[in-house]
Image (cartoon, rainbow, N blue to C red):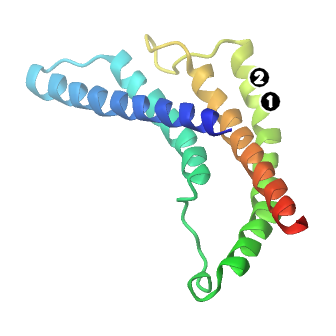
Amino acid sequence: MRAVFSGVRRICMVLAVIVFLGQLSMVLMRYLLGYGFLEIQDAVNYAFAALVALSVAVTFSADKHVRVDIFRQKLGGNANRWIDWLGDLFLALPVFSIMMWMAYPLVRSSWVILEGSPETGGLPGLFLVKTCLLVLPTLIVLLTLVRVIGFFRRNAS
């Protein structure tokens, strides 16, 4: 599982570079040369959308996501583990499972028509970006299942 998230983390780093360099080149070309490329704009938009979706899973796997717990700081480690377990079981699993279920028809229809940019002359491959709508919840559900099973194993022994 670590190898999967390490690979996703590397993909996110590459996407961040694409977003930065693409946006920089678009701005420089537009305002210095007075010329722009729709393909670069689409590439930046695609990379940013994929980066946002995939970085959620990377952040969740590194346990660096935002917590809205006002009591967490005052509680001990065991209580925090129980809060995490309950959150994984009753929030993360249902929400991301529903997200997978709801995103599947959209992604499937996008693949059927090999959906491209809505802009005339834009880049093809929007269907690949929409696939991130399935990759994100799948990664979160898998990670949550690993955490829940690990919690049971620790508490059973």
Three-letter code, disc 2 = Arg
Q: Residue tagged by mark 2?
A: 108
Quadrant where the C terminus sits is bottom right
> The residue tagged with tag 1: helix, strand or loop?
helix
Q: Is residue 28 left or right of residue 83?
A: left
Gap between marks 1 and 2, in whole Å? Answer: 5 Å
Q: Residue at x 15, y 27 (%)?
A: 28
Q: Residue tagged by mark 1?
A: 105
Q: Is residue 124 left or right of residue 135?
A: left
Q: Nearer the viewer, residue 41 or 53?
A: 53
Q: Mark 1 touching mark 2, by CB under 8 A?
A: yes
Q: Position of residue 85 (x, y in %)?
A: 77, 66
Q: Position of residue 69 (x, y in %)?
A: 61, 78
The single residue placed furthest to the front in the displayed view is 157
Give the quarter of the image for residue 108.
top right
Q: Residues within 10 Å of mark 1 (few under 14, many from 20)?
A: few
Give the quarter of the image for residue 151.
bottom right
The single residue placed furthest to the bottom in the displayed view is 74
The single residue placed furthest to the right in the displayed view is 156
